[in-house]
Amino acid sequence: MRKFENQVQLVKYEILKKISEYAFNNSLDGHIIDIPKIVNPGPDPRFRCCVYHERAVSTERVKMALGGDKEDPNLVEVLDSACDQCPTNRFTITESCRGYLSHRCSLSCPKDAIYIRNQKAHIDYSKCIECGKCKEACPYNSIIDTMRPCQRACPTNAISINNLKKATISYKDCIQCGACVYQCPFGAIQDKSEIVEVIKELNRSSEDKDSNIYAILAPSFSTQFNYVNLEKVIKALKIIGFKDVVEVALGADLVTIWEGEEFKSHIAEYSYMTTSCCPAFVNYMHKKFPDQTHNISSTVSPMIAISQIIKRMDENAKVVFIGPCIAKKGEKNLNSVKGVTDYVITFEELAAIIDAKQINFEKIQANPLNNSTEKGRGFAASGGVANAISNYIKLKELDLEFKPILCSGIKEAKKVLTMAKLGKLQGNFIEGMACNGGCIKGPVTMHYGNKDKKSLENYSKLAKEKDPVSATEIFNTENIMRYNPL
């Protein structure tokens, strides 16, 4: 039975499921305006002040499920009606203020926003610019910082608060990592969806024999559907209408070979090379370390690699990536690979699609998925890419010194890339992942349990292919494995 870890997941799921039901029945246009009331029937509210507020938020969620604001280049948007329950003022002076004589808090304020009354400090919020200097100056720690979760989570300071006290996202600084989406406790930041387009393709393929829709599954799916046999999930995808289901881990096996060979030539000229699998990490390097981007691997990501293989084998193919990542929605639209992967949906969206089709897992047969290696599946966790390439170097007996450094999260990436820029890197290969723990901790996964890594390991051990060379030798990879990431 499906379980949700929090109410944010539940309310998003309700919208996506209802939209999917109507889309499969080709009746969405006539019911769009009804959905907010259907999922929030009232008269009593479930989570907010009133049912009308809940319907207003649901209306915005419907818009995001339909693709969001077409004029906004961001993959994530702030839902204005939902962004209204965080503290409006970031800094607060507590009762522990002693009103000492030196008044360092007021003297440190560049805008004269702090004044003393009755021997206590007070903040004039009409002047406060939230610089935090008063907090730093207070010797009693009497000033607390209630920075909003979305701001605190953002690794590039792309989120600010406007004059209406709503969060805003700077496209210039956003790396599409999705940390804000996951961390917002009210679900007020959401990713744009292609779920309707995917369902339209599935409907079309059921009528047109020349329209073939392929699902490519990220290996982190092994951590998500922990309430059912994973092989039944594969069968469910085929019942829904996908012609076939292919592991993205097979693309990871291809990447292992190509990045291993690229490392050999790259390191002869430069001091280090980074992975290119995580688009949010690649975005981060381009925006924050542009002078280091020549060190990014030119090998395509596993998603692009396996999509290329499918397109080469079936000229009528449409490819849908299913995974835990928001940044993948941006990667597929890069000019260098546009049209290779046609759509990207998340595990949250897949769950809604499966349930909209009323798939009964107890009544369907398992459908094995065994066409990659253990190391390829391991790409989904921090350390997996480096481990796979290290194994390949040993397999091929390459005369190389391979000294990987793992960056689990952007905070670690910033430290490591700074050291690299200064020429003080204690290694020659950087595995960059924007999410702490790797893809299994992606922002739009349904499950964030402590057993996720173990679930991935168990799934990886089921792989029948022994090494990336034998697993991929039947494929012609000429002219499909290199690209300039941005």
Image (tube, rainbow, N blue to C red):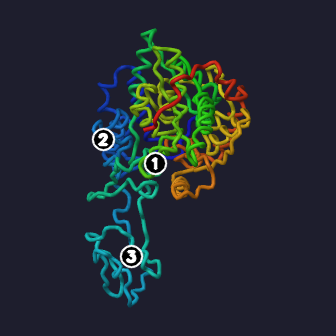
In front of the other: 433 or 445: 433
Q: Earlier in the sequence, mark 1 or mark 3?
A: 3
Q: State which quarter of the image contains the C terminus.
A: top left
Is the residue marked by circle 3 packed among few (<14), some (14-19), or many (20+) residues within 10 Å? many
Give me the C-alpha separation between circle 2 and circle 3.
36 Å
List x then y, in percent, for residue 42: 36, 42
In front of the other: 414 or 320: 414
In front of the other: 198 or 389: 389
Does 396 sit left or right of 186 as displayed? right
Callout in the foreground (2, 1): 1
- Residue at figure coordinates x 35%, y 34% from the top left: 67
Q: Is residue 370 above or below residue 188?
A: above
- Residue at figure coordinates x 48%, y 49% from the top left: 292
Give me the C-alpha separation between circle 2 and circle 1.
20 Å
Check whether the beta carbons of the residues at disc 1 and disc 3 lie within 8 A of each other.
no
Residue where numbered disc 2 is placed: 72
Is the residue marked by circle 1 packed among few (<14), some (14-19), or many (20+) residues within 10 Å? many
List x then y, in percent, for residue 22: 38, 25
Residue 232 image-quadrant placement = top right
Q: State which quarter of the image contains the N terminus.
A: top right
Instruction: Tell me the kind of residue under disc 1.
Output: Tyr
Residue where numbered disc 1 is placed: 284
Residue where numbered disc 3 is placed: 134
Is the residue marked by circle 2 packed among few (<14), some (14-19), or many (20+) residues within 10 Å? few
Q: Is residue 215 above or below residue 413?
A: above
Instruction: Tell me the kind of residue under disc 2.
Output: Asp
Which residue reaches farthest front? 269
